[in-house]
Amino acid sequence: MSNFLDEYALILSSCERPSRYIGDEFLSANKDFNKANVKVAFVFPDKYEIGISNFGHKILYHIVNSHPLYMADRAYAPDKDFLDLLKKYNKPLYALESKKPLNSFNFLGFALQYEMSYTTILKMLEFSNVAVFSNERKDDDPIIFAGGPCAFNPAPMSDFIDLFLIGDGEEVLIEILDLYDKIKTKTRDEILAELSQIQGVYCPKYPKKTTKRIFIPDKKSHPVKSPISHFVSVHDRATVEIRRGCGRLCRFCQSAHTNLPVRERNADDIISLACDYVKNTGYDEYSLLSLSSNDHTNIENIIEKLNKHFSGTGVNVSLPSQRADKFSIKLAQLMQQEKKSAITIAPEAGSQRMRDVINKNLTQEQILNAVLSCVRSGWDKIKFYFIIGLPFEEDEDVLAIADLIKTINYNCKKEGLRLPSITCSISVFVPKPHTPFCWHGQNSIDEIERKKQLLLSRKPEIKNAKLNFHSPRVSQLEAFFTRADKGAGRFIYKLYKNGSYLDSWEENINFELYNDIACKLGIDFSKEAVKMLNPNDISPWDIIDCGLNKDWLINEYNKAKNAQNTIPCEQKCSNCGVCSNLKMHKIYDKSII
Ligand code: SF4
């Protein structure tokens, strides 16, 4: 540590927020670098306060550090001022706990959470003194792996990443480290060739159809402590993952389709994990994490028991996203706390027709009942998620968002309730690989702007609602990258070379640079984003097998055209293919009566 402080003192004393770069947070694992057989640094290509909250990172960090022979450390994308200082003093990026340069690890594992962080990964490799292109790396360079939602289309990053981990990482990561430990004296190519044979590993150097890994979440693999930031992080709370996957099958949602089948954790484990996590960390809030938390079979019983356990301690529960049709008065009452945060509901679309197109399986009455239950129970803040630019959307569907809020207001007034303050986060539809909408083009920026103005024209009628729109320009880039082929690698490389960094923050994006480079390379990303693809053509992501049958996806797309619902797989299997193809089955907790 003293060597580190000597070496980096000038940088740390000159940068903003040095606490991002010093490590030694409460509950860091701090395993001995020199004693570990295999050393992994998990690298998050976004700022410290985002990365330290990432639950996927926490799981993998816990699993590797629980292994007696391996160690895991962490690194996050430094702010630009810190990078400039590293350059000025000719110092490499290092891992926070061991303070070892990142190129001294055996593996660097990048989180592929968001397409707009691709250039940040390249910059972090450069500052780690690791060749940016996989084929230029030497035997003693770390192996670069990446996993997360964007790995389901590995094509755009396949020039830079040695191994993509497809699906759940818990088991496959340990298999990789076990095998590496046995063969680490071999050449880099030999090692990659052998690692590429593990199920769930896609190696661009040895490309083959790769089937995702599925892990049945168990108690042992779930962390009950994790490093706590010296200053604020985006999610400053204990987190317990209560179920993985979502059988609602909303047609735009990639997480739902790539994480099938549903696997629920049992209530006893959830309660015990939440108690231990809060006890170990001292957090005053715990989150019950899932794609739709109140879909868990025993959600009310679990919160009831945890409420009893934490009674009088000021520890509160939060549910990140809730299904309106599963929101009950009992749940609203159970969630009554001293600190009432906003209730989050995701209707996604304002009109019933549009909710049927996207297979939301949600009626206006159910949304209304959920909101009224909350307001009657004292909640005064509601957060809604909507999407505009969805396939087969008409202007009336966009205006229906305002109509829905007006209906809520009308019913609140009728009951003599105070109008809640409503915040609507309105994103732009992005066609995602492995979903029934993957072939459908995005609306052009002009069309999205027109729809935005259309909705804003109704704003005076819904004064208690705030409408926050996601940038259509950023959404267009997301749509391009998420469906891109290998050729996009040149674009990503040129962007990085010309200064693109931390572009997951819109204020950092130089749109002119994107346009100039695309023009020079002959790439028309605006055309690619709106392009309707032919389902019968090969897509770049077809090399990844999530278990979903293509015929089923096409059928879902055709049903969307006619606004036909598919019954959620919780109620009836629609034979999407995942269970039979991957020899798995959905797992629900036994109902506690
Ligand atoms: S095969 Fe059936 S049960 Fe399994 S994930 Fe698909 S729809 Fe659900």
Image: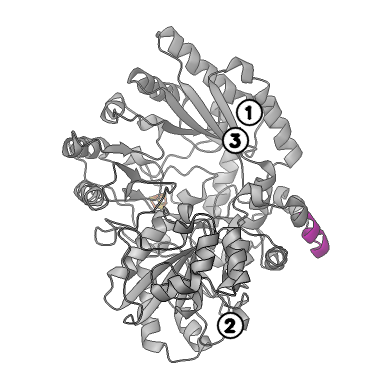
First in residue order: circle 3 vs circle 2: 2
First in residue order: circle 1 vs circle 3: 1
Please check the rendered image and state whether residue 91 is part of the magenta-colored stretch, yes or no: no
Check disc 3 and report the residue beneath it: 562
Q: Is residue 125 above or below residue 480?
A: below
Please, what secondary structure does the residue beneath circle 2 have?
loop
Q: Is residue 450 visible?
A: yes
Q: CA distance from mark 3 to mark 2?
A: 51 Å
Q: Is residue 412 above or below residue 66?
A: above
Say whether mark 2 is within 8 Å of ligand 1: no
Please, what secondary structure does the residue beneath circle 1 have?
helix
Check disc 2 and report the residue beneath it: 137
Residue 371, by quadrant, is: top left
Q: Is residue 571 visible?
A: no
The residue type indicated by label 2 comes to: Arg
In this view, the residue in front, 139 or 127, is 127
Give the mark toward the camera: 3 or 2.
2
Q: Is residue 158 left or right of residue 256?
A: right
Residue at 80 percent across and 57 percent down: it is 516
Check disc 1 and report the residue beneath it: 398
- Disc 3 vs disc 2: Cβ atoms closer than 8 Å? no
